[in-house]
Amino acid sequence: MRIDVISAIPAIVSSPLQESILKRAQKKKLVEIFVHDLRDYSAGKYRHVDDRPFGGGAGMVLKPEPLFKCLDELTGQRVYDEIIYLTPQGKKLKQKTANDLSLNRNMLFICGHYKGIDQRVIDSFVTKEISIGDYVLTGGELAALVLIDAIVRLIPGVLGDSESALTDSFQIESGFDAPVYTRPAEFRGMKVPEVLVEGNHKKISEWRAAQGKKKYNRVKRKKLY
C-alpha cells in the first residue's frame, strides 16, 4: 500500500510516522507513506499557501494553486483508489470505513488547515471526505494520522499477533472488547475474574461476549441522555 499526505505543516505528520506500529509497517515494506510539503508548490518568496476568503469573514483558506500543482503532479504519476479530504464536514470515521480503505493500493490524503481548502480543489479531485469526530482541530494533520493508523494496522503482517486486529473493539459484534487482565492474578486485594484463570475456553468466550455487550449497552444508554 502507498499513502501520500499533502500538508501545509508536514512536521506534524512526519514525526509520529517514525514510531511504533507505523514505523514497523514501513520497515517491513508493507506500506509506503510519503508526506508532501504544500509550501514546496507555492509561488513567491514567502511561499504563501493561504489567502482571505471571498465574501469576507474570519480566518484564511488554503489557496487552489499550490494544491492543484501538487495534486496534478501526484495524480500524473499514479492512479489513486481514493483521494481523501480530512474535514469536520466529512462522513464520520467508523471501523468499517477503515476496513474498506485497508484494501486499497494507493491513497492520497489532503490535510485542511485554517478555514479549509478552496472548494474547487474538492470538486476537481476529492473522492471522499472523512471526519474523525464532531469537534474542531487546528488542521487535518492529526485526523490524517488517526485514519492512517486505523488503516495500516489492518494490513496483514503489520501486527505481531495476526488475530489482534480481528478481535479489536468495533470489529466484534457487540462493538467493544471485554475487560482485560494480566499477571498477577491478585493485586492490592483485587482478583482477576475466576473464569479467566480456569482454562475453560468456551466459558471464557461466553464471558467476553457478555462483558463486551454490557459495555456496549452502557455506552449506548449514555448516548441517549
Image (cartoon, rainbow, N blue to C red):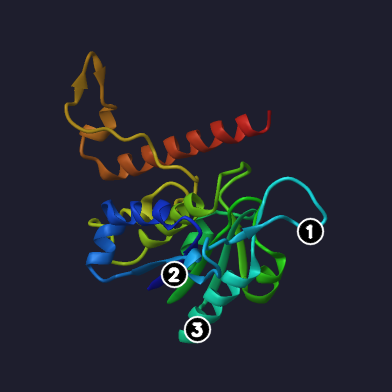
Residue at horizontal 43%, vertical 35%?
A: 211
Q: Is residue 63 left or right of residue 176?
A: right
Q: Position of residue 75 (x, y in %)?
A: 52, 81
| The C terminus lies in quadrant | top right
Residue type for callout 2: Asp
Furthest-top residue in view?
189
* Label placed on residue 79: 3
Of marks 1 and 2, the one in the foreground: 1
Residue at horizontal 55%, vertical 68%?
A: 44
| 1 or 2: tag closer to the N-terminus | 2
| 3 or 1: tag closer to the N-terminus | 1
Rounded to the nearest angstrom, the CA distance separating label 2 from label 3 is 12 Å
Badge 3 marks a residue whose secondary structure is loop
Badge 1 marks a residue whose secondary structure is loop
Q: In this figure, which residue is indicated by the disc labeled 1?
A: 54
Q: Position of residue 62 (x, y in %)?
A: 62, 60
Quarter-wise, where is residue 94 in the image?
Answer: bottom right
Question: Is label 3 in contact with label 1 (beta carbons under 8 Å)?
Answer: no
Q: Is residue 166 left or right of residue 173?
A: left
Determine whether 80 is above or below 184 in the image. Answer: below
Q: In this figure, which residue is indicated by the disc labeled 2?
A: 4
Q: Nearer the viewer, residue 87 or 207?
A: 87
Q: Is residue 215 visible?
A: yes
Residue type for callout 3: Val
